Image (tube, rainbow, N blue to C red):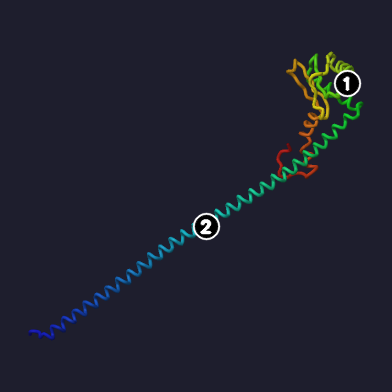
């Protein structure tokens, strides 16, 4: 049977409605899938950026912590250096005071003469030369010349050797020094310094660790006592 126009129209409308419904469902399906993929991608990007931000601030935190440690270490080292400087200055003040008192020995000619005698004899032992020039402070020249005979006799008794002594009249030890002698031989090529300052420095090198311990106590962190 032939369909009437109204039936045809109904069929067309029915097909169009079906197609439209299918299209809407497909569009909704596409929208839902797109929304799902968008949310997944958004979540991935958010997580990725979140991790980057966390890594950035963790790195910054580590840098800040490292800076704090470096600053703390530098401040600690500066404090230690200041303490060491103060201690060394104090030790040096003790040695300076000892040097000052040592210079007072020269005020007693008899005592100082005995010290000069011992210093010269000791220097002669080291030189083992037959002709020796003695260099002293200009103020000590008369005192030194007065003990030359005793020095020669003492040296001869101990070594069975004679020695010729003379005072250096052209060069003298510093007048503000503590005193003592320099012995020169071999046409000036050989020299033994036996000044009181020199002897004090030698003794100080040996006693400084004991001085430190006496002033500041024993340092448990010190491995070598030099």
Q: CA distance from mark 2 to mark 1?
A: 82 Å
Estimate the x, y position of residue 123 in percent, counting from the top left: 81, 22
Contact between marks 2 and 1 (CB within 8 A): the answer is no
Query: Tag on residue 223?
Result: none
Give the vertical position of 161 relative to 14 (above or below).
above
Q: Which SS class for mark 2?
A: helix
Lateral position of residue 135 relative to residue 68, left or right: right
Mark 2 or mark 1: whose residue is earlier in sequence: 2
**Label 1 crowding class (10 Å Cα cut-off): few <14, some 14-19, many 20+?**
few
Q: Nearer the viewer, residue 140 or 102?
A: 140
Query: Which image quadrant for residue 103?
Result: top right
Give the vertical position of 134 relative to 178 (above or below).
above
Lateral position of residue 49 relative to residue 28, left or right: right
**Label 2 crowding class (10 Å Cα cut-off): few <14, some 14-19, many 20+?**
few
Which residue is depicted at the point 43% across and 64% down?
46
Q: Which residue is mark 1?
A: 142
Query: Which image quadrant for residue 163?
Result: top right
Q: Quadrant of the N terminus?
A: bottom left
Give the vertical position of 4 relative to 114 (above or below).
below
Estimate the x, y position of residue 47 in percent, counting from the top left: 44, 63
Q: Which residue is mark 2?
A: 58
Q: Which SS class for mark 1?
A: helix
> Furthest residue to the left?
1
Estimate the x, y position of residue 208 in percent, counting from the top left: 77, 37
Q: Quadrant of the C terminus?
A: top right
């Amino acid at each position: 049977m032939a369909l009437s126009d109204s039936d045809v129209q109904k069929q067309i409308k029915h097909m169009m409605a079906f197609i439209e419904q299918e299209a809407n469902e497909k569009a909704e399906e596409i929208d839902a899938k797109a929304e799902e993929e968008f949310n997944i991608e958004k979540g991935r990007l958010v997580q990725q950026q979140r991790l980057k931000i966390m890594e950035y601030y963790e790195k910054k935190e580590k840098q800040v912590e490292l800076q704090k440690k470096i600053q703390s270490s530098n401040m600690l080292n500066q404090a230690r250096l200041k303490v060491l400087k103060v201690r060394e200055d104090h030790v040096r003040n003790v040695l300076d005071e000892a040097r000052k008192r040592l210079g007072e020995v020269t005020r007693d000619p008899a005592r100082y003469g005995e010290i000069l005698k011992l210093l010269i004899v000791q220097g002669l032992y080291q030189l083992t030369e037959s002709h020796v020039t003695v260099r002293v402070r200009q103020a000590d020249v008369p005192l030194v010349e007065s003990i030359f005979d005793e020095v020669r006799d003492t040296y001869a008794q101990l070594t069975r050797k004679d020695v010729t002594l003379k005072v250096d009249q052209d060069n003298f030890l510093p007048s503000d020094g503590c005193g003592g002698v320099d012995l020169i031989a071999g046409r000036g090529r050989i020299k033994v310094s036996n000044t009181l300052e020199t002897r004090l420095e030698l003794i100080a090198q040996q006693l400084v660790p004991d001085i430190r311990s006496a002033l500041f106590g024993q340092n448990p962190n010190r491995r070598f006592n030099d």
